[in-house]
Amino acid sequence: MNDPCKKWLPRLMAWFDDEASELDAKEVRAHLLDCAPCRAAVQSWRELRLDLSLLQPDEPTEEVLERMAWRFEEGLADEIHSTSTALRWWGRLAAALMIGLGGLLIAERTVMPLAGTVEASTPREIEEAVQEILQRPVELMPLAPERPVPSGR
Ligand SMILES: [Zn+2]
C-alpha cells in the first residue's frame, strides 16, 4: 500500500466492516476504483475473513457457502483422481503378484522335480499358470507350498 493510502486505511477498514458512514463509503468506493493497491488490500482482507469464517462457520454467508461448495468439488475431483491413480497402481501390483504367484506354482509343479532349473519358467508357462489360478475355486488355492523348498542341490 502506498504512503498516501495509509490515511485511507482506517476508512477502508471501517467500510470493509460495514461501519463507514454513507459519505465515507462513497469516498472509499471512489478511491478503490482508481487505487489498485487498496483494492488488493481489501481483497486480501476478504480472503482472510473468508478463511476465518470457514474456521468458525457460525454465520456462513452465501459467498462462504459457495466457496466451500467449490472447494469441496475441487477436493473431490482431486480425490477421485488420486483414487483412480491408486487403483491403476493396485491393478499393476495385483498383476505383478499374480505373475509372481504363477511363477511359484510353476516352480512347485514342474520345475522343482528338476531342482535347480528355476529359470525354465517361460512367460507362456506363467500365463498358463495364471489362467489356471483364475479358473480354480478360491478354497483350493494353496497359500503356501506344501513341500519345503529344496535348499541344496
Ligand atoms: Zn489507495
Image (cartoon, helix red, strand yellow):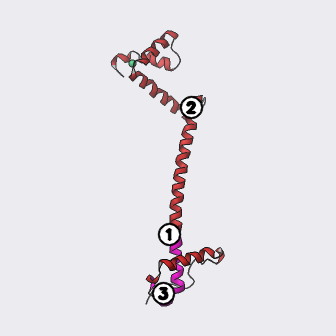
Q: Which residue is mark 2?
A: 64
Q: Marks 1 and 2: in contact by CB < 8 Å?
A: no
Badge 3 amino acid: Pro
Tell whether position 98 is magenta: yes
Q: In terms of sequence position, does the residue under pointer 3 or pointer 2 come before the other?
A: 2
List x then y, in percent, for residue 12. Answer: 45, 18
Q: CA distance from mark 2 to mark 1?
A: 47 Å
Badge 1 amino acid: Ala
From this viewpoint, which residue is outermost toward the front? 124
Whether residue 50 is visible: yes
Give me the residue at 49% from left, 17% from top: 15
Badge 2 amino acid: Val
Q: Is residue 127 above or below residue 14?
A: below
User: Which numbered marker is on residue 96?
Assistant: 1
List x then y, in percent, for residue 138. Answer: 64, 74
User: Which numbered marker is on residue 39?
Assistant: none
Element carrying mark 3: loop
Element carrying mark 2: helix
Q: Which residue is mark 3?
A: 150
Q: Which residues are magenta?
A: 97-118
